[in-house]
Image (spheres, grey):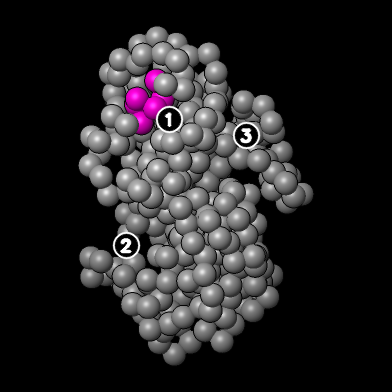
Amino acid sequence: MSEPRSVAILGAGMAGAAAARGLAEAGLSVAVFDKGRAVGGRMATRRCGSLQFDHGAQFMRAHGPAFAARLAEWGQRGIVAPWAGAARWVGIPDMTAPVRALLAGLPAASGVTITRVRRTGAGWHLDTATGTTHGPFDAVALTCPAPQVKALLDASGFALPTVEAATYAPCWSLMVAAPGAASEALIEPREDPVGLIALDASKPGRPGGLRLTIHATAAWSRVHLEEPHETIVAALLAGAERDLGIVLHPTHAEAHRWRYAQVDHPLGVPSLYDPALRLGAAGDWCLGGRIEAAYDSGAALAGSILADLGTAA
């Protein structure tokens, strides 16, 4: 019997995980690579000793049937649960759980930076920052943020039309632990500097205590993007105290900069794929700044690759 067709997926966020699961279920061989410390992408959780913060995406919603069905399945398995009303769902025990569920049993390597993709004959090879090479693969799927997709393609001598048209807004995120209690699970002041304040302990399956994730507004984050972390901590802490009407006495305060946080201008297409090159890309930047959009885009790219390569059945 011939070996199944193989696909390299660069990016282990929701789009990459959805693409990997769709391809694997059709019988193709997949290999997932991500430069981060763990899978999940912007569905991220930071642990600092006994503390835990969902410092990236705070929740998911379903607008279409495909993601609604996936959320229902995850809910039955205890991977997600409702939170803070308005049809919001969160992962259990953290926001990376849905991505880990999609990637379960599949080869996914974290901490691997791909610096170039090379096409040799009909196959693809991936060069890493440490000098190693992976491949050959029959197709490559790029599921990182659009500016990173374009940078990698430029470095590799390839292009996918319109990638550069997708733009992002940045976001500073502040993780705070303090004595005391907060009553509201989620507030969204949307008044500089604070866009959102989430009480992590209010989410199902989380440790107790007053732990807040504070997201800055996009406009404020743009202006202050390159400022020192200590300046960001002070400004967002003051803003949160203003919006909460309490004085916080942090035992832990840590800022994280998301350079590509929220999609400003999506492409308006499900995904990109060049069958001549067997090279494609997907992400929330294709359809809109939602976790569901990333899932749908990854699934669409898997469909395009399967239509080209065929299934293993």
Mark 1 vs mark 2, CA separation in Å? 28 Å
Tell me if mark 1 has few (under 14), some (14-19) or many (20+) residues whose alpha carbon lies within 10 angstroms of its own: many
Task: Report helix, strand or loop for mark 2.
Answer: loop
Q: Name the kind of residue labelled 2 in the image.
A: Thr
| Mark 1 or 3, closer to the camera | 1
Span of residues in magenta: 236-241
Name the residue at 38% across, 83% down. Answer: 157
Q: Would residue 58 be found to the left or right of residue 71 on screen?
A: left
Task: Report helix, strand or loop for mark 3.
Answer: strand
Q: Of 156 and 253, which appears nearest the observer? A: 253
Provide the residue designation for mark 3.
89
Give the residue at the far bottom of this rendering: 121
- Location of residue 219 in the rendering, given as x and y in whole percent from the top left corner: 44, 46
Q: Name the kind of residue labelled 1 in the image.
A: Thr
Mark 1 vs mark 3, CA separation in Å? 17 Å
| Mark 1 or 2, closer to the camera | 1
Provide the residue designation for mark 2.
113
Quarter holding the C terminus is bottom right
Q: Would residue 50 be found to the left or right of residue 30 on screen?
A: left
Give the residue at the far top of this rendering: 180
- Location of residue 258 in the rendering, given as x and y in whole percent from the top left corner: 38, 48
Provide the residue designation for mark 1.
213
Magenta segment includes 191? no
Above or below: residue 31 compared with residue 13:
below
Per the rendering, the mark at residue 224 is: none
